Image: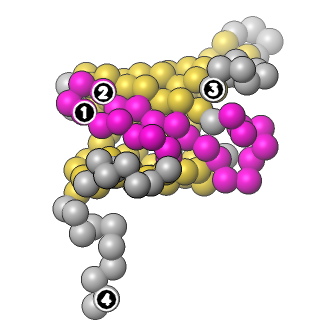
Amino acid sequence: MANYLISGVFFEKLVNKTKVEQKPVMYSGWIQDDTTGKHKWWGEMSDIYGKSKLYDPIITPSELSFLKMYDNRSRFDEGIIYFFKPKGLIWVGTYTLVPGSKDGHRGVSKCVLNKLPEDFLFSSGK
């Protein structure tokens, strides 16, 4: 299993009386590609809307994807799918509420993924 720190932004549309703006919202967390298949979720993330768990991560040289489920947030019960492709040193992609959700919320997201030593997410007891 490989451990990663993930940091990035997703862009929300803000509609004013005169224009539409894209507001960046920062997120950060950790993610682990669980090659054993033993875990339903394997990662956590936080942003201004709260803490979330990351499910079904796929991390390859050409793709990064996961399902994000907010803790204790009924608005996003269906989850949010993130899908990225590499572009230089960053990952660029989209986020979309799971199909069938009520508001069809979607947008652009960008992130960086930093690979960590295997023991980084575990306390050493020292």
Question: Residue 110's image quarter?
Answer: top left
The kind of residue on which mark 2 rests is Glu
- Disc 4 element: loop
Q: CA distance from mark 2 to mark 1?
A: 5 Å
The residue carrying mark 4 is 125
Magenta span dominant secondary structure: strand
The residue carrying mark 2 is 63
Q: Categorize mark 2 by other alpha carbons within 10 Å: few (<14), some (14-19), many (20+).
A: some
Q: Which disc number belongs to residue 60?
A: 1
Is residue 62 left or right of 111 when viewed as pictured?
left
The residue carrying mark 3 is 98
Mark 1 or 4: the one toward you:
1
Q: Categorize mark 3 by other alpha carbons within 10 Å: few (<14), some (14-19), many (20+).
A: some
The kind of residue on which mark 3 rests is Val
Question: Looking at the image, is 15 positioned above or below residue 113?
Answer: above
Q: How many marks?
A: 4
* Residue 97 appears in the figure: yes
Give coordinates of residue 72: x percent, y percent: 73, 53
Q: CA distance from mark 2 to mark 3?
A: 19 Å
Please give the range of residues in magenta. 54-78
Q: CA distance from mark 3 to mark 4?
A: 40 Å
Who comes first in sequence, dot 2 or dot 3? 2
